[in-house]
Amino acid sequence: MKIIKNLLAIVGLVCISGLFIFAVQKPADKDLEPEQKLINDYNVYAIKLPDDLNFAGETVPISDPDVYERMDKELLVNTYWQSNGLLMFKRAKKYFPIIEPILKKHGIPDDFKYLAVIESGLTNAVSPAGARGVWQIMPATGKENGLEVNNNVDERYHLEKATEVACKYLLKSKNSLGSWTLAAAAYNAGNAGISRRLKEQDVNDYYDLLLGEETGRYMFRIVALKEILKNPKTYGFNFEESDLYTNIPTFTVTVDKEVSDFAAFSKDYGINYKILKIHNPWLREAHLNNKSGKKYTLEIPEKGYYNKS
């Protein structure tokens, strides 16, 4: 009888033109458990832009109405793309501790870790133009900066080495263009592209440039993700520390010869080929050519973290 009363409280039966239609009513908060109440009270709110938005200490001039609207858009889009936002929090806990000390070593502002977030979502992404990895490095840029890039080994997928290359590129851009904001924009459009547009439009600031869709949104997206990732509660993201992804402890193995079968190689360390590739995504094939005897360092997970470890 209690079940029937509860159903009647939520569902009304309406007769229109001979047809019976169920009209579902929103249940009252007092009838709900706390978890249900959270869902019941879901609302969408306008977002107040903070007055002190900046990138690498360089102010975002939201007093400019165009800048305000574009910043507002990216903050709204990324706040209410909740599933993607939660994934960024989860992955950041795993990858920021690797990226941050490398940025610091090169004198690159910590804010550039958010550039990696919008470039790839902190995944080993593949772009239609041929860019690869967390930092989305093109083949020529990788090779020019000492990365091995071929079908057998592609170090653009090696997070530490790729971060080193990104730092070199960003320092060069900063020295050429004069600001960290322009250096970040040049990571998307190229140093020559940004320099040309600054000259053509006779301005010296990113926020004064008229740019194409992608580069025009670029800095606003970075700043929006920075603001959200630094202030999860402010933007409605709720999670426990245990919900976030973490790095699996590893030890290193040096290989200086050919490996004919990485599946067999993996078994010697109590793992399988899939797990070897998870920790060494720069290995692009199931074997290692290495006719030159080059030394490669592989990361092997410590025992106990995977079923077969």
Image (cartoon, rainbow, N blue to C red):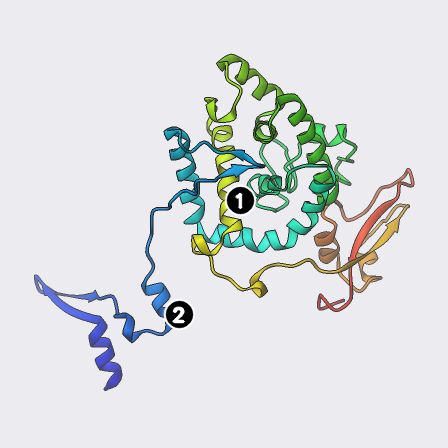
Left or right of 244: which side holds 262? right
Work out which quarter of the rendered image holds the N terminus and state it.
Answer: bottom left
Query: For the residue labelled by badge 1, is the local secondary structure a helix, a strand or a loop?
Result: helix
Left or right of 289: which side holds 80? left
Figure check: 104 above or below 8: above
- Residue 226: which disc? 1
Work out which quarter of the rendered image holds the C terminus and state it.
Answer: bottom right
**Is residue 103 visible to us here?**
yes
- Residue 35: which disc? 2
**Residue 172 place in picture, x, y as percent:** 69, 26
Left or right of 238: which side holds 267? right
**Residue 204 place in picture, x, y as percent:** 53, 19
Residue sitting at 55 percent across and 40 percent down? 118
The quadrant in which residue 174 appears is top right
Q: Amino acid at mark 1?
A: Lys
Residue sitting at 70 percent across and 29 percent down? 141
Q: Foreground: 122 or 104? A: 104
**Residues under labels 2 and 1: Cα distance?**
29 Å
Mark nearer the viewer, 2 or 1: 1
